[in-house]
Image (cartoon, rainbow, N blue to C red):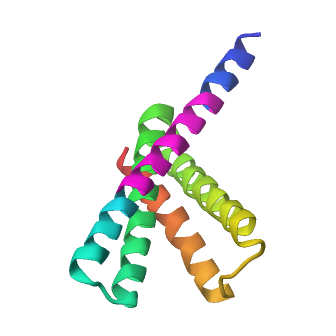
Amino acid sequence: MERTGKNNTTALSILKILLFMYIITGVLLLVLTLLLSKLQLSESAVSIGIVVIYVISGFVGGLLAGKKMKSRKFLWGMLMGAAYFLILVIGSVVFHKGMDMEASRFATTLVLCIASGMVGGMAG
C-alpha cells in the first residue's frame, strides 16, 4: 500500500514539473513575441529563439526532476524532455490537424528536448 502512495507522489511531481516547463515556455514565448514586435526579428532569429526556449524548458524540467528524484537523475531528466516533446507533438497535431513539420526538424527537436532534459537532470 505504501508503494502506491510513492507512485502517486512521483506521478504528481512529474505533472507539476511538466506544468512548470510549459509556464516557462509560455513566458519565454511572450518575451520572444515582444522582441519580434519591437525589433522586427527575422524568421531565422525567431526559429533560433524557439529552439532556445525548448532547450531552456527542457533543462529546467530535467533539473527539477533530478532534484526531486535524487537517483538516476539523467534518466528522469530524459523522461521530462521526452514528455515535454510528446505534449508539443500532440498539441501540434491537434491544433494543426496533422503534422506540419519535416522529419529532420522533428528529429532535431526530439533530440534537443531529451538532451536538454538529461543535462538538466545531471545538474540537479
**Quarter of the image holding residue 18?**
top right
Tell me residue 76's x, y (percent): 55, 46
Q: Nearer the viewer, residue 33 or 61?
A: 33
- If the image is split into quadrants, where does the N terminus sit? top right
Tell me residue 39's x, y (percent): 22, 80
Q: Nearer the viewer, residue 92 or 73?
A: 92
Q: Is residue 42 above or below residue 50?
A: below
Q: Which of 20 and 91 is in front in this view?
A: 91
Q: In this view, does 12 lie above or below 36?
A: above
Residue located at (63% from left, 79% from top): 106
Q: Give the range drawn in magenta.
A: 11-27
Tell me residue 10's x, y (percent): 61, 29
Indicate yes or no whether the magenta region holds residue 95: no
Q: Residue furthest left?
A: 39
The answer to whether 96 appears left or right of 36 in the picture is right
Q: Nearer the viewer, residue 76 or 64?
A: 64
Indicate yes or no whether the magenta region holds residue 16: yes
The answer to whether 83 appears left or right of 42 in the picture is right
